[in-house]
Every structure is written in C-alpha cells, then in structure tokens.
Image (spheres, rainbow, N blue to C red):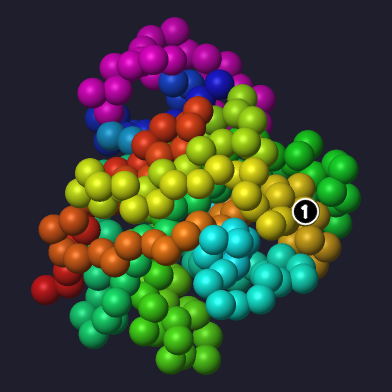
Amino acid sequence: MKYARYEAQGNIAYGVVEGEWLKPITTTPFEPYEIISHEHHLSEIRLLAPCTPSKILATALNYKSHLEDREAPTQPEPFFKTPNSVIGPGDTIILPRNAGHIEEEAELVVVIGRRCTKVSEGNALNYVLGYTCGNDVSARMWQKADLQWWRAKSSDTFCPVGPYIATEVNAPNLEIWARVNGTEVQHCRTTELLFDVPTLISFISQVVTLEPGDLIFTGTSGRPAELHGGDVVEVEVSGIGTLHNPVQAEA
C-alpha cells in the first residue's frame, strides 16, 4: 500500500494511492481509518511531504562506498535534522547565500508508525509504518567548519521527502538512484548498508523515543553531486517512487 499526504481545494489530508488515483482516508495512516468513497486523480492534487515528523534522525557513514579514506564506524552514527527543513515533492530546494559547496544525498527513509522506545532489533520493524524517499541536502563547507551540523544539515528546505509512504517493500534489498538534470549521480542497493534498518531503530530508541511520523534517514552512498541553482534533483527508490525537487540559489 502507498499513502500520500496532499492538498486539494485548500484542505490537507491523507489518502491511499492506487495507480494514478488517490482515495482519501478519514484520518492519518498512523491510526485506524476508513477509506472515503470519492477519488482524486493525482493531477488534480498537490502532493505534500508524506508526514509531519516531530524529529528526523539521519545516519552518517552507513555505506562503505561513502567512507572514502575514513574508517567504518563501529556503531550507528545518527545526527538530527530539524522539522523546519522538511519539504515535499516539487518544492524548491533553496541554496543559502555564502553556504559554498552544497550536495544532494539520496537515501531510503524509514517512517515510524507507532511510539517506539527501547525496542530490540528483533522487534524493531513492528514499529515501522513504511518507507519513503529522502534527500539529505548538505552544505559541505558548513559541515566541515562548524562545531555542530545545525545549518549544514537543517537549513530551510534541506530535507525533501516523498512522494509516498510505501508499506509493502523489501527494505533490505531496494535500489536507490539519484539524478541531477537527468544524469545519474548515485546508485546503490540497501544490501550495502553497514547498519540495517532494525539496528538503526533499536540503537536510536534506546535513548530517544520515536513518535508516529518520525523519520530515520538510513545513509547515502558513493560521492553525491554538487547542486546549483537551476538544477532539478531526483531521488528514486524501487517500489516507492521518485522524489523531484527543483533547486534555486538564494537571491
């Protein structure tokens, strides 16, 4: 099943996506709901970020291909991205003035489905609603120069996610692509993750309680591409969909 959060005629709601059609539901997918009888064609609605997280944790150095000359971590290395950075499909990534070199990072993103604290790896997937596509936009100059990554990772618009939450995908073996202006710049499989999804959820939940709609970015592969004003960046994950975002340099 695929869920979408959308806007139609000024109203924001959730729905179930089937092909080119969306069937609205009575509440959110994080609680019991009923499907409403009428439908919207996807061309008639605006897709939004698929949830509104209270927190976002992203994972550093979780693919061997992204390590370069660095040693592999001995445990997951999560960091926070803040909710102000979340945007949805089609929304514009803004490159801040004086930020220097900014890159895309294509990632599989875990969507937490129910309150999750101190769970075991064996039980962790019971707390997952589904998965979506994510772009961990990163300002490399700030990332290297600042004591904290607050602006390098959490500037406004630096967390595109969407287009859907997919509940029936094989997370341990998905393909991930990134394209800039139609040219492939990243390609990997989640089989390459150093720490898999259950490990990340369990590790984080030992000290941070995860709430419905919270997001975990699982890490990026290889060498991400630099972004410039006028670019269009796409993140595609097999079985989920493609997240498109134009890029604009701050005036």
Residue at x 28% of width, y 81% of height: 99
- How many numbered marks, from 0 up? 1
Percent position (x, y) of residue 29? 58, 31
Quadrant in the picture for the N terminus: top right
Looking at the rendered structure, the secondary structure element under dot 1 is helix
Q: Is residue 2 left or right of 201 when viewed as pictured?
A: left
Give 160 or 117, whichever is nearer the viewer: 160
Residue situated furthest top in the rendering: 37
Residue 74 location, quadrant:
bottom right
Left or right: 155 in relation to 248: right
* Rendered position, 180 above or below 101: above
Looking at the picture, how far across and down is residue 237, in whole percent? 47, 38
Identify the residue position indicated by label 1 in the image. 199
Dominant secondary structure, magenta: loop
> Which of the two residues, 236 or 152, is positioned nearer the viewer here?
236
Q: Identify whether 63 is placed above or below 232.
A: below
Residue 200 on image: x %, y %: 72, 56
Q: Is residue 219 magenta?
A: no
In which quadrant of the rendered view does residue 128 lie?
A: top right
Instruction: Identify the magenta region.
Output: 18-45
In the depicted view, which residue is nearer to us: 140 or 163? 140
**Residue 110 visible in image:** no
Where is residue 11? Give x, y as percent. 33, 34
Residue at 17% x, 69% y: name it: 249
Q: Quadrant of the C terminus?
A: bottom left
Crowding near the residue tagged with mark 1, few <14, some 14–19, many ≥20 C-alpha atoms within 10 Å: some
* Residue type, numbered disc 1: Thr
